[in-house]
Image (tube, rainbow, N blue to C red):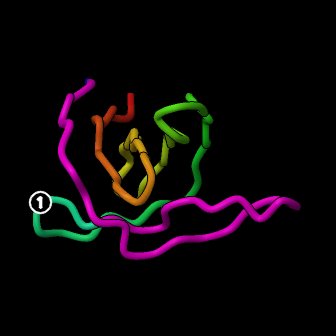
Amino acid sequence: MTQIINAPVNVSAYYFAGREMKTFPKEIEFGGEAVTFLSGLRYLVQRGQQGVVKLFDMSSTDGLTYRLQQTGDSWTLLGTKGAF
């Protein structure tokens, strides 16, 4: 089941992956709790006048997939999708 959230979040930890050492969120603070991620995918959505916008689909330890958006230094939790 998909849940749309669209709320700002704080990223409290990062990790790096690949030869290019791309950054990924490792942990976020949402709803007063810490959510830890195991792995994820990163998409570059837009680059231009508005700057760089990145989307992340992150798998967490609670079995959900979290979609995050990074615009500059701000992070938004767009929604979650549960495991089947």
Q: Is residue 34 left or right of residue 68?
A: left
* Residue with the most extreme left position: 32
* SS type, badge 1: loop
Q: In the rendered image, which residue does mark 1 sit on?
A: 31
Residue under the image location 45 percent in, 53 percent down:
72
83 shown above or below 2:
below
Q: Where does the image place residue 26, in percent across and percent down from the top left?
A: 49, 67
Q: From this viewpoint, is residue 54 visible?
A: no
* Residue with the most extreme front position: 49
Q: Is residue 70 left or right of residue 3?
A: right
In magenta stretch: residue 32: no
**What's the magenta region?**
2-28
Q: Where does the image place residue 78, in percent across and percent down from the top left?
A: 29, 36
| Image quadrant in which you'd find residue 7 | top left
Q: Where does the image place residue 2, in percent across and percent down from the top left?
A: 27, 25
Q: Where does the image place residue 69, in percent across and percent down from the top left?
A: 40, 42
Amino acid type assigned to the residue bearing label 1 in the image: Gly
Question: What secondary structure predominates along the stretch shown in magenta?
Answer: strand
Residue in front for this viewpoint, 55 or 46: 46
